[in-house]
Image (cartoon, rainbow, N blue to C red):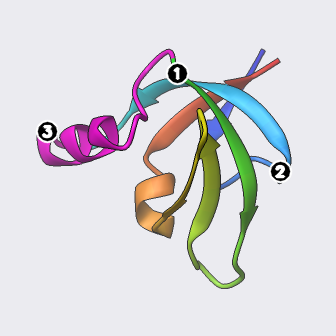
Amino acid sequence: MKTLTLVRMKPDTKGKVIEVTGGQALMQRLMSMGIYPGKEIAKVGHFALRGPVMVKVGRATLALGHSMAEKIKVSIE
């Protein structure tokens, strides 16, 4: 198992959220979007130069800011 941030994940890769390294406000915001520890997440792609990161959580496709995606740690098998 490999652990890395959501930003460093390759596109079209699935993984499980291990932890969110941020404050309570960030954790609540991500939980309202369906992103929490233990949840499976798939990276769809990202935009160049610290742009948004596109992820798929369940049936929803979301765009997360680069700094927000950097605080999400994911494990890949």
Q: Mark 2 or mark 1: which comes first in sequence? A: 2
Locate residue 54, reporting x and y percent.
63, 61
Q: Nearer the viewer, mark 1 or mark 3?
A: 1
Quarter of the image that includes the C terminus: top right
Locate residue 7, reporting x and y percent.
63, 55
Residue for badge 2: 10
Q: Residues within 10 Å of mark 2 (few under 14, many from 20)?
A: few
At 43% across and 47% down in the image, what residue appears?
Answer: 71
Q: Nearer the viewer, mark 2 or mark 1?
A: 1
Q: Is residue 50 above or below residue 21?
A: below
Cβ–Cβ below 8 Å for labels 3 and 2? no
Locate residue 27, reporting x and y percent.
25, 38
Residue 26, can we see it? Answer: yes
At 40% across and 34% down in the image, what residue appears?
Answer: 34
Q: Which mark is residue 23?
A: none
Q: Quadrant of residue 59?
A: top right
Q: Residues within 10 Å of mark 1 (few under 14, many from 20)?
A: some
Which amino acid, by three-letter code, is at mark 3? Answer: Gln
Q: Mark 1 or mark 3: which comes first in sequence? A: 3
User: Seen in the image, is 62 located left or right of residue 12?
Assistant: left
Q: Which residues are magenta?
A: 23-38
Residue 6, can we see it? Answer: no
Q: Secondary structure at mark 1?
A: loop
